[in-house]
Amino acid sequence: MQTSPNKKQLVIGNWKMNGSSAANAGLLRSLLPVISSLEGVEVALCPPFPYLSTVADLLDDSDVALGAQNLSTELTGAYTGEVGGTMLRDIGCRFVLVGHSERRALYGEDDACVAKKFATALQAGLIPVLCVGETLVQRQSGETQAIVTAQLNAVLNAVGFNDLVKGVIAYEPVWAIGTGETATPEQAQAVHRHIRQWLASQHRAAAADCRILYGGSVKADNAEQLFSQPDIDGGLIGGASLDAMSFAAICSAAQVKPTS
Ligand code: PEP
């Protein structure tokens, strides 16, 4: 059981809490001409909330999709300071990150909260990108598969399999995010294979079609090896997405996937 050969690889840039109006415009001015010539790869960018509309305008003539980094568990109402999925859809977002490890660790988002956000994203017409992954301690104690499976099960139990596979899954080992330490292609592939097999145990064809991205210190010089693994369907890129040439090189590395 492997990824479907017809599926486009997907590369998503997560700008985190970085940028300014001027910096974003400069980044896109350098990036868009380079990635407009790429084929066989879908690209999306997730700027911080205040810049979503401006970035949406700047992306207007391109094939690059817009995504948000977070959304409320609720669709609308008296939730001061929150941002609802319907609003994100309204301003042109296609994707939204759900359960990023920084949200889980720094803002107390547990599996139940992540599952609610996943369901709300679908209700709003967004494609949730469900981030899962183990800490270093969990990896060292041999718990990687159990942790990832539990994080997936929390969403499966909340929304059911048919809705789960409407989203994208991003395997992001916590120890590799923003640390410069990347999972080796073999380590990443082993977890991606586990996720694919877990999906296949519910529905074989849907498992092959579901996109499973790798995230964690992907750079221009390690992207190709990671993306050529049979169960890796692209990447979720943090730090390197802030540099136009690095991000363009990563998107380019996702273009060609050898069929196996
Ligand atoms: C991320 O924020 O999802 C991420 C993978 O970050 P980095 O690429 O910087 O490790």
Image (cartoon, rainbow, N blue to C red):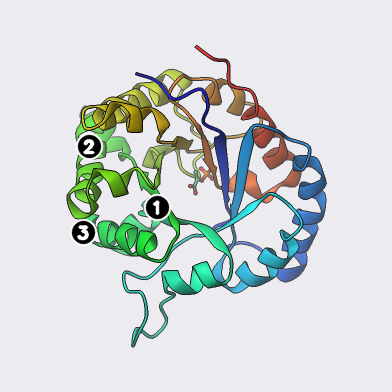
Mark 2 residue element:
helix
* Residue 213 in picture, x, y percent from top left: 46, 36
* Residue 246 in picture, x, y percent from top left: 70, 39
User: Amino acid type of disc 2?
Assistant: Thr
Q: Answer with mark 3 or mark 1, whichever residue precedes in sequence.
A: 1
Mark 1 residue element:
loop
Which residue is tagged 3? 112
| Disc sitting over residue 100 in the figure | 1
Q: Say which of 237 and 85 sits in front.
A: 85
Which residue does the image show at 21% across and 27% down from the upper left?
Answer: 201
Residue neighbourhood size for the residue with mark 3, other residues' Cα within 10 Å, grouped as few (<14), some (14–19), many (≥20): some
Q: Answer with mark 2 or mark 3, whichever residue precedes in sequence.
A: 3
Q: From what the image shows, is residue 69 above or below residue 72?
A: above
Q: From what the image shows, is residue 207 above or below residue 82?
A: above
Which residue does the image show at 58% across and 21% down from the upper left?
Answer: 257
3 vs 1, front mark: 3
* Residue 28 in picture, x, y percent from top left: 76, 55
Farthest top residue in view: 260
Which residue is tagged 2? 149
Which residue does the image show at 76% across and 57% down from the upper left?
Answer: 61
